[in-house]
Image: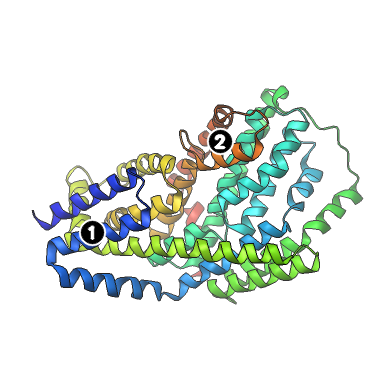
Amino acid sequence: MSEVEIGLAGIVVLLIMIGLRVPIAIALFTVPFVGIYAMFGWRPALGALKIIPFNFAASWELSSVPMFLLMGYLAYHTGITAGLFAAARVWLSRLPGGLAVASIFGASGFAAVTGSSVATAAAMGRIAVPEMLRHGYDPRLATGTVAAAGTIGALIPPSILLILYGVIAEVPINQLFIGGAGVGLLSALAYVVLVILWASAKPGVAPRSDDKFTLAERFRSLRKVSPVLLLAVLVFGGLFAGLFTPTEAGAVGASLCALIAAAQRRLTWNSFRVSITEAFTTTSALLFIVIGANLLARFVALSGVDAYISDVIASVGSSTYLFLAGVVVVYIILGMFLEPTGAMIITLPIVLPVAASLGVNELWFGIFLAKLLEVGMITPPIGLNVFVLNGIVGRGITLGQIFRGTTYFIAADIVVLLLIIAVPAIVLFLPGLMI
């Protein structure tokens, strides 16, 4: 077999292993090792296994991952973000679909602290969905809104998905963060417009709230979330202003989060211990996957598969839009079956070189992929956010009802994707100001 044939066979074997539910990290280590052995023998294979993981894990920017994870888990387990939905509800409940709109803004604020779409969907599912159902909202609208709003967590800083992309693709993380924030806010706006139009066209799905709040009550609600807003402003303001590196921003955020929780008497030994444990566990799992992806990238490069795929695409027409259309199809399908981090990491060694050969901006491409992968989180048959939400809400609401609700939001996501393809400045304008 030629080296290219070995590379292509390795990719097929990798997909088969993942399809057979072999853990992604094990598949990512096994296939490159065996592939490099088949091409060059034992010594190069063992050398790659010794040198590549060490060199990649020594990347300083990877140290931001446990810091931001710890900040997110502390915020989640101490409940310091619980007032976000309440404050949004006080200000927005009189709008058509006001409680659903409040859920979107509450999810955006929660995402800005945790950086996790699943955690955002889980938290808002506990807080917002029961409130909407109590006010007579259609279960499709109530659950679909929260499942979709959870996906904002992969775009608004501190997105772990964007951190890992930045390390692998060697793109500045602070630029990815500010570009992702713009697309995250655009997604939130698209969801808000959708909810208002849906509730206006069919008032029965979202009865108007009878709640009335005075101006004083509205401003009192802001006091409850002011510590969280201060946390976000200090951490990300310092990061974007160049005062902190990503690692320092994560460390400052985790420390401030612990201090805020302690000041509010929410920080217990158990919540601190669970937060530390989950941050270490998640970091370890992510590092194994990312190091495996780096091995896969080296295997793909050595076999010449990346150049081969680029040549094939060039032979059928070097249209960037045709390439992006293929990426959309592949990533939405992968997002249905794989967790976003794993789906991104196993494919980056293949798609990044092709994107580069077509002149696609790597910063824009990373945010585009993050948005695509999050669409898969609410797409049947295995939208992870939908399953998480179904497990939390219960109340006789079926998976089918939630998926029917998310269908409307998938349409809004497609509009957002088309916008950022047609107008790349939506992603690139703010990062361009930082250069």
Name the side, left or right, on which 60 lies relative to 151: left
User: Percent from the top left, x then y, of residue 226?
Assistant: 78, 61
Residue type at the position of mark 2: Phe
Seen at 48% across and 54% down, the residue is 425
Whether residue 190 is visible, yes or no, is no
Characterize the local packing of mark 1: few (<14), some (14-19) or many (20 or more) Cα atoms within 10 angstroms.
many
Q: Who is closer to the viewer here, 301 or 259?
A: 259
Q: Is residue 281 visible?
A: yes
Residue 52: quadrant of the picture: bottom left
The percent coordinates of residue 207 (x first, y second) are 76, 27
What crowding class fits label 2: few (fewer than 14 Cα within 10 Å), some (14-19), or many (20 or more)?
many
Disc 1 versus disc 2: nearer the observer: 1
Q: Residue beneath label 2, please?
A: 409
Q: Tell me where residue 234 appears, x and y as whole percent.
A: 68, 69
Q: Secondary structure at mark 2?
A: helix
Coordinates of residue 118 in the picture (x, y in percent): 57, 48
- Image point 56% across, 33% down: which residue? 406
Residue lying at 57% horizontally and 60% vertically, measured from the top left: 157
Specify the quadrant of the image occupied by residue 345.
bottom left
| In front of the other: 53 or 192 | 53
Q: Residue at x 48, y 63 (%)?
A: 163
Label 1: state its secondary structure.
helix
- Location of mark 1 (residue): 300
